[in-house]
Image: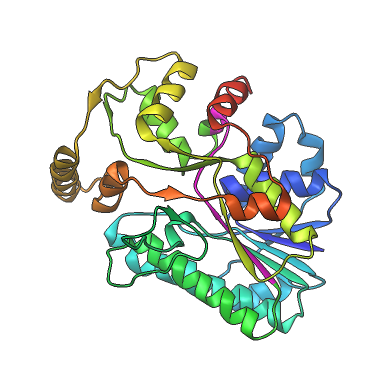
């Protein structure tokens, strides 16, 4: 049997659908009964509602050791998708607890229960930092602790260290490092995280764009590659999953065209973004509002990191979906 954590999240829900479509016997853990409806909505979105009933749901929490004891009964393979995503400095402690301690618990149980293979869904945020002579960030790029990193990036890097510890103790693992994951636009009705925040901001009439770039990948490719890696003989490796490195202005324009709204038309230069995140911090503090822009997200908006996907293309001969075409095609769902 396969165990999936984070099955009520964007990645986990799509992964559950892919696993069941491929005949896997799946158990998924949840913390709140209400969240299961999100996963059901994903299955219904793809006209696969009948397959939802094949999931073996179990209430458990990656931070609750006794509940994991039950969750791991008869488990042979694990996909660990559960994670907290936040770039708000106020969430530093809970980020580290959830992403690092939670992953440590999953690794420990996988070792104790002699799980055959463990897949950890990490992030390109946990990859290394470019040296002056380097152009592309790869799986081998060194992490430089002297450089600034978001609390989220540190928590995912720390989680990876727990997974590599598992390798040293005999666990076979796969780590995937997806870029910004793009799901169908219609999933904004179900989830608020990740790329769906971009969709919602553009839909509301986002005026500003930046000329930074990052790696983007579709949810279809992420779930498909994770499954293929777990079925392969490949082990104890990590893989960067991006379709392409894309300028934020270009991805925003594609989303705007699909949503039939006005394209962002004002260039937000780095200095402007710097003042904007400071103003947002003051506003959120005074009015007790959730941060909409932090120092980390502001910096990311104009950073120009380039990521290489050559390792996964060589390992599985992967042909990634074109991100712009994907957004246009799945907008009809």
- Which quadrant of the structure image shows residue 177? bottom right
- Which quadrant of the structure image shows residue 326? top right
Residue drawn at 62 percent across, 52 percent down: 33
Task: Tell me where residue 45 appears, x and y as whole percent.
Answer: 67, 30
Q: Magenta span has 178?
A: yes
Q: Quadrant of the C terminus?
A: top right
Residue drawn at 47 percent across, 36 percent down: 196
Is 204 rendered above or below residue 106? Answer: above
Q: Is residue 11 left or right of residue 235?
A: left
Q: How many marks?
A: 0
- Which quadrant of the structure image shows residue 236? bottom right
Q: Is residue 197 left or right of residue 121?
A: left
Q: Quadrant of the N terminus?
A: bottom right
Residue drawn at 63 percent across, 67 percent down: 237
Is 95 rendered above or below residue 101? Answer: above
Task: Tell me where residue 125 appears, x and y as whole percent.
Answer: 43, 57
Task: Tell me where residue 135 appears, x and y as whole percent.
Answer: 40, 53
Q: What span is in magenta?
A: 173-187
Magenta stretch prevailing secondary structure:
strand
């Amino acid at each position: 049997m396969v165990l999936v954590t984070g099955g009520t999240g964007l990645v986990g829900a799509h992964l559950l659908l892919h696993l069941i479509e491929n005949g896997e016997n799946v158990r998924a853990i949840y913390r709140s009964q209400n969240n299961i409806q999100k996963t059901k909505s994903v299955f219904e979105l793809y006209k696969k509602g009948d397959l939802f009933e094949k999931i073996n749901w179990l209430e458990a929490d990656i931070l609750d050791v006794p509940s994991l004891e039950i969750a791991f009964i008869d488990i042979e393979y694990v996909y660990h998708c559960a994670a907290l995503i936040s770039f708000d400095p106020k969430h530093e402690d809970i980020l580290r607890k959830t992403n690092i301690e939670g992953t440590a618990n999953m690794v420990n149980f996988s070792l104790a229960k002699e799980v055959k293979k463990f897949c950890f869904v990490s992030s390109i945020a946990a990859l290394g930092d470019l040296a002056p002579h380097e152009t592309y960030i790869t799986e081998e790029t060194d992490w430089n602790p002297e450089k600034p990193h978001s609390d989220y990036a540190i928590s995912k890097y720390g989680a990876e260290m727990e997974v590599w510890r598992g390798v040293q103790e005999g666990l076979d693992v796969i780590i995937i490092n997806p870029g910004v994951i793009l799901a169908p636009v219609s999933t904004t009705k179900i989830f608020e995280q990740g790329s769906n925040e971009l969709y919602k901001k553009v839909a509301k009439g986002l005026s500003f764009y930046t000329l930074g770039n990052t790696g983007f990948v579709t949810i279809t490719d992420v779930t498909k590659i994770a499954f293929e890696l777990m079925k392969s003989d490949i082990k104890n490796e990590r893989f960067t999953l991006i379709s392409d490195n894309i300028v934020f202005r270009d991805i925003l324009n594609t989303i705007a065209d699909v949503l039939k709204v006005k394209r962002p038309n004002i260039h937000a230069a780095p200095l402007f973004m710097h003042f904007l995140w400071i103003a947002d911090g003051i506003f959120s503090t005074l009015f007790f509002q959730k941060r909409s822009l932090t120092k980390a997200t502001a910096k990311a908006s104009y950073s120009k990191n380039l990521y290489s996907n050559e390792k996964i293309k060589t390992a599985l001969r992967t042909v990634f979906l074109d991100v712009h075409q994907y957004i246009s095609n799945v907008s009809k769902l």
